[in-house]
Image (cartoon, rainbow, N blue to C red):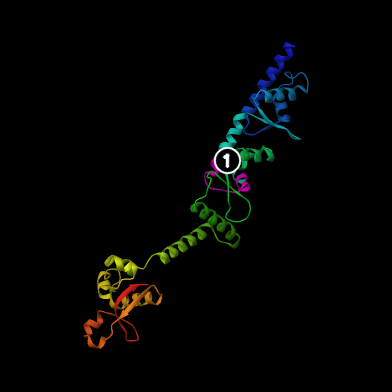
Amino acid sequence: MLNEQSMHSEASVFVLRALERSSQPVSLTKLAKAIPKSVLKAKNDLPEILRQLVKDGRIRSYEARSSVYWLPNLEDQVFARILEALSAGPMTQTDLKNKLGSSLIGWPPPKRDEMIAQLIEAKRVYEVEPLTGNAKLLSVHAELSPQDYIKLALHLAVTKLKPLGFTAGQVLAAAQDLIRQELAADKPPVQLERMIQLKLAAANGALVSLSELRRSLVAEIPGKTVFDQAVLRLAKSGRVALHHHDYPGSLSQEERDAMVSDEGGNYFIGISKV
């Protein structure tokens, strides 16, 4: 009996050594090849040795048609790789498995799903709402930021446009250009900003002198024609109202030139925010 226990102990050492050298789970067949025939008394001894090692918590296994075995720390390494992959940004479970690639070789698919489920249960990974579709995204954050969703949108755009011949660089450059345009469209015109600087009440519609506004913007909008056209365009867009002079004929040419005029012969002396 002691001799049999000794042989089993020696076989256990070979099993543990084989698992230590492997970066992925090892099948029963491969483990059998790693143990000298002289160590195993009978062919059925190895499954019993493995069951005892699993029972003792020294190794772990997944029982299937082709059972596999691994050391506990190998499973911990997979957990770490999952978290590292998700730290780059949220992704679907399928994308995660594709990204991990070789890290999951040898792991039965149900075991892979089980490990992800364990991380979700431990609240180290969260299921969050996707940008499109119904498949939940996996993330290391309980809630996604706008930046996360924008990153997903850009990735989706790159993926969808690649078959049409567009490179990732072209797509990202186009996105940057669109963002610049949107920011420029949302930014208040310099005239509105300067009106408020000249008179705080202008934010609420108070009248500002156009001649005073012209002088304050001479560096940004030089020249009478350029300034007049900029103000007229702003009025046409409905963002400001222009107040005209009732009797421009009573003024000198120099006084009229200081005002904003349009092609209809109107002269404007003031501007207010609508």
The residue lying toward the viewer, choosing from 224 and 128, is: 128
The percent coordinates of residue 54 (x first, y second) are: 68, 26
Which quadrant of the figure has residue 57?
top right
* Residue shown at the point (59%, 59%) measured from the top left: 160
* Residue shown at the point (35%, 76%) measured from the top left: 241
Residue range (magenta): 82-97
Please tell me how crowded label 1 is: few (under 14), some (14-19), or many (20+) other residues with Cα within 10 Å. many
The residue that mark 1 highlights is 82
Determine if the magenta segment contains residue 228.
no
The residue lying toward the viewer, choosing from 211 and 26, is: 211
The percent coordinates of residue 122 (x first, y second) are: 58, 37
The percent coordinates of residue 197 (x first, y second) are: 28, 65
Which quadrant of the figure has residue 38?
top right
Position above or below: 84 against 225: above
**Amino acid type shown at disc 1:** Ile
Could you tell whether 220 is left or right of 118 in the image?
left
Position above or below: 169 against 196: above
